[in-house]
């Protein structure tokens, strides 16, 4: 059914997001290898199984010595020490003997008894003897065991998205498999008699379906597993068939057919199959957004214009996909920028304007300039944009130099 609120109220963006996300649960986690972990959301804390580093080692190429043996060394009066051996990475050195030096390489174990590394640049070699020219202080260039991480320390937290660096850290901590949030199954469909698949030359009065490839990629980027079900024709029966097929997924995302046109069937069919809580949102672009449930799936019906579809996916579908994976940060971190020129918007609608960022000449906040025509079908300005400028609903004119929030797109 379609609730009274969905049919009559113009809801704020924040209110619609809150209402939507309250319905979303976290999917069961799964265990994967490190080779599949990039971009996944951790479902458990990752602690170190060992100390890092696991042994005292050298931070420099040079000579391992006892600091007490070189306290009076200087360039004019160097201390001469016999070189008693070598320590290199991957091999255990012998014990250090007082009054001697041991050649040592970066990352190599410190020999027992040595407490300082004199860097190579502060020495000169005379056969089997090294001349120490600097009174290097105790502990210099020595990386003690566990100086970075101790066994048992928690380093990676549940809810964070794994980067390439995080994967390297997990490996260093002794892990080759990770528990991560499950990937939401996202069913995608488009509607419209005028649409043809990408790669098909459009006939008269036809358009290429650009939303479906765009949204498929956006689902992947957010961590979901997309399935494109096809293009529904502008008939109630065709729309119903695809929505029923989609309802077994975790999330259903449709594009077009959610407004009040004579051939817009998505709203009516979705209301018959589930419960719709939101229909109209006080925003531009993307005012008609249908939000609710479709049997056991979350349902989001996006507008058909490409820019509106992209913006509403960013604000509504992306955070749902991330919450289903257990992510702590559901939305992108917003930036503060200064507007580069005077801009205007409709009163009463929270507006998301495509903009290009440029570095400020004075080193201050980046300057944001319009990316071009802000019409909801204008894809050129969307592909040029670095960010979306967020203008509050109550503003109509935004003066040049105004500090505003921006949602980064790249």
Image: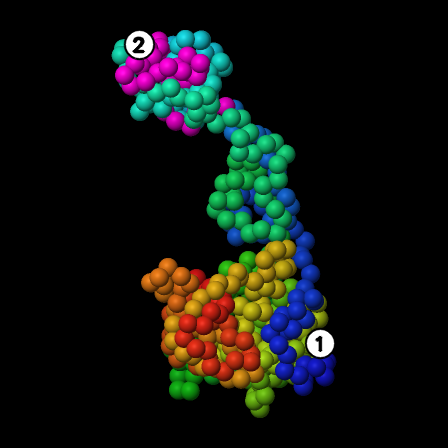
Q: Which residues are magenta?
A: 56-83
The percent position of residue 47, horizontal first and vertical second, equals 61, 38
Quadrant for the N terminus in the image: bottom right
Determine which residue is flagged by label 1: 275
Q: Is residue 389 in sight in this rendering?
A: yes
Nearer to the camera, 5 or 125: 125
The percent position of residue 390, horizontal first and vertical second, equals 50, 72
Q: CA distance from mark 2 to mark 1?
A: 85 Å
Is residue 41 a member of the stretch shown in magenta?
A: no
- How crowded pointer 1 is (Cα within 10 Å; few <14, some 14-19, many 20+) is rated as some
SS of the residue under disc 2: loop
SS of the residue under disc 1: strand
Reply above or below: 175 against 213.
above
Q: Is residue 104 in sight in this rendering?
A: no
Is residue 63 a member of the stretch shown in magenta?
A: yes
**Tally of numbered discs:** 2
Determine which residue is flagged by label 2: 128
């Amino acid at each position: 059914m379609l609730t009274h609120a969905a049919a009559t109220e113009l809801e704020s963006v924040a209110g619609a997001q809150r209402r939507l996300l309250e319905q979303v649960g976290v999917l069961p986690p799964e265990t994967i290898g490190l080779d599949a972990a990039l971009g996944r959301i951790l479902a458990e804390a990752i602690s170190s199984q060992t100390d890092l580093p696991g042994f005292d080692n050298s931070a420099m190429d040079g000579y391992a010595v006892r600091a007490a043996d070189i306290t009076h060394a200087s360039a004019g009066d160097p201390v001469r020490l016999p070189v008693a051996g070598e320590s290199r990475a991957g091999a255990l050195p012998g014990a250090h003997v007082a009054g001697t030096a041991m050649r040592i390489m970066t990352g190599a174990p410190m020999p027992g008894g040595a407490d300082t590394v004199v860097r190579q640049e502060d020495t000169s070699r005379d056969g089997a003897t090294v001349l120490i020219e600097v009174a290097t202080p105790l502990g210099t260039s020595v990386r003690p065991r566990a100086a970075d991480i101790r066994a048992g320390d928690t380093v990676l937290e549940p809810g964070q998205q794994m980067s390439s660096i995080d994967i390297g850290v997990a490996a260093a901590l002794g892990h080759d498999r990770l528990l991560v949030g499950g990937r939401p199954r996202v069913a995608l469909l488009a509607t419209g008699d005028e649409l043809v698949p990408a790669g098909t030359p459009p006939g008269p009065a036809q358009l290429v379906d650009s939303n479906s490839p765009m949204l498929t990629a956006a689902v992947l980027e957010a961590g979901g597993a997309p399935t494109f079900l096809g293009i529904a024709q502008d008939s109630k029966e065709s729309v119903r068939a695809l929505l029923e097929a989609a309802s077994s997924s975790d999330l259903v995302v449709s594009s077009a057919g959610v407004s009040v046109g004579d051939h817009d069937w998505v709203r009516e069919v979705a209301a018959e199959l589930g419960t719709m809580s939101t229909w109209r949102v006080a925003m531009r672009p993307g005012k008609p957004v249908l939000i609710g449930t479709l049997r056991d799936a979350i349902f989001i019906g996006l507008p058909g214009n490409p820019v509106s579809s992209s913006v509403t996916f960013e604000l509504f579908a992306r955070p749902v996909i991330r919450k289903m994976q257990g992510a702590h940060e559901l939305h992108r971190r917003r930036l503060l920028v200064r507007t580069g020129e005077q801009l205007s918007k409709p009163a009463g609608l929270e507006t998301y304007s495509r903009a290009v960022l440029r570095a400020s000449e004075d080193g201050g906040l980046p300057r944001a300039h319009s990316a071009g025509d802000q019409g909801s079908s204008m894809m050129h300005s969307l592909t040029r944009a670095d960010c979306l400028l967020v203008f509050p609903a109550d503003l109509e004119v935004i003066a040049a130099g105004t500090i505003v929030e921006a949602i980064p797109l790249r």
